[in-house]
Image (spheres, coloured by chain):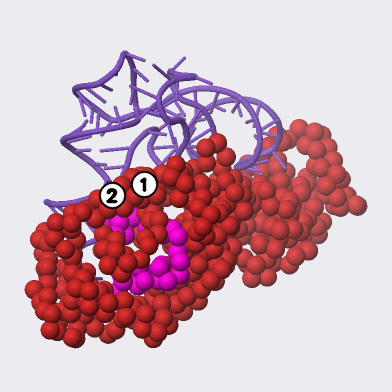
Amino acid sequence: MSGTFKTKSKKVRTRFAPSPTGTLHVGGLRTAVYAYALAKRYKGDFILRIEDTDQKRLVPQAKEKLEEILKQFSLTWDEYYVQSERVKSGIYAKAAEKLVRDGHAFYCQCLPRNAKTEGFSKILRDPCRDKNLRTGAIKLKVPENKKVSYRDFVIQKEIIWDSGVVDDATLLKSDGFPTYHLAVVVDDHDMNISHVLRGHDWLPSTPIHLLVYEYLEYDRPEIGHLTDILDPEGGKLSKRKGSVSCEAILAEGYLPEAILNFVMLLGWAPKDDREIFTLEEFVKAFDENGFQKSNPIYNRDKLNWFNGEYIRNSKNSILMTKLVDFFNRKYAEEKLEKIIPLVRERLNTLSEFESLAGFFFELPKADKKLLGENFKEHLSGAITVLEGVNIWNLENINKALMDLIQSKNFKTGKFFMDIRIAITGSSVTPPINESMEILGKDESIKRLSGILN
RNA sequence: GGCCCUAUCGUCUAAUGGUUCAGGACAUUGGAUUCUCAUUCCAAUAAUCCGGGUUCGAAUCCCGGUGGGGUCACCA
């Protein structure tokens, strides 16, 4: 390999540069994880840069929310910048003016064009490359017949354009704010970013950036474009088919570690068959040659599996903390402590706790249709023997019930199913004798008799 | 439509010209355990998009199709 990544002279510095126009998506999260891992793998810096140069699209609190979510995923940054705050320094305007001075950009007063009214097939050149203009927007003056190229470190291939297909992109808007094309180049240079890692959607505008790098006489960072995560129904991942915002997925009861592990492996894979990675382990295992080049599909089943794995592998105490937080302290810890061992292997998401263990807290409405034909015999028998249990523990409950089954010749499965329905209201539950032990003698018997009355 | 990226089981992927009747995981199906459901364990089904080359040998390299995706704003 080229050795680009092992250079001792240059520290690896990556950045995650979201625009605060909405919530963080799983795709954005994945980009952030890779950028983070790349930096940390080489003991470098991970930088968060808020790209908020479009004042019209700002969403209140989006920035704060973004930061909070990144923290939830333990993606902590070493440095932090906000582009709009940097505009005042004049750094972007100076760069744009230099380009004009050097003949690589021009002022333009054309009305902003609109892709929808303009048609799409022709290459659009602005007609007003007028040397004398000093107002309006500043646009890149793209040369004719020039080959523009770079080697993409994700795609691992040289990508070449003819300048004829590159647009005279706007660099500085007439409101004085830079567009992405200028800001990204100026900032990545100013912040000493060594590796630009971003979404595939930026690939087509890369030649613009390449030209700007050249004209500003900047050293170019390594550039890599990640695949897009696709929707199972086709096209880029979208909101309407299930939640893809990190916030929403978290709210459904998925654990940050599981989500992280899931997105890590959407487009990157280790050389061995390992699948479970904490963030720290991922950083160690990560290498920039393992990227997939074609777009992966967002696969909910695998996420569910990861989440189940993480729940099952959590210590009971940790799982309790997570449940307490997730349900906003709705459930008492003492009770949770007893219930968790019964449900931990049955939970794929935290939210499922409610349907699986809700009966511990609230008397369920039993659907009598679920009961077997011998339910009266079963329940009254159970009540009788359970009344006789003086020390209410699992062993005694088991014995009382098993003796009953044997003496009355009940079908074990049918018997317990009737008990289950009466106690929990559901046919899918944790082990029923253990559940009754937790519920207590009085409550258990109360529920059993409730059905008979 | 122009430009660009891409193509291994249904899905995520391994294999970087030869230890491969293509390996792992999820999902699916069957079985074992079991008071339900899970967990756990075992097993099965299942892929190199198509067509040409190059080579003794191709999933791997080249070309052409086709499919998928992206992009073409004073948005990022």
Q: The disc numbered 2 marks a residue on which chain?
A: A
Q: Which residue lies at the image location 18% right of the left edge and 86% below the top edge?
A: A134
Residue under label 2: A159
* Quarter of the figure with residue A181: bottom left
Q: Nearer the viewer, residue A413 or A75?
A: A75
Number of marks drawn: 2
Give the colour in which the image draws chain A: red
**Residue type at numbered disc 1:** Ile
> x, y percentage for residue A192?
46, 66
Q: In the image, B44: left or right of A344?
A: left
> x, y percentage for residue A31?
45, 58
Q: Which residues fall within the magenta stretch? A: A177-206
Circle 2/circle 1 CB separation < 8 Å: yes
Q: Which residue lies at the image location 31% right of the left edge and 69% below the top edge?
A: A216
Q: In the image, A316: left or right of A427?
A: right
User: In the image, is residue A275 above or below residue A126?
Assistant: above
Residue under label 1: A155
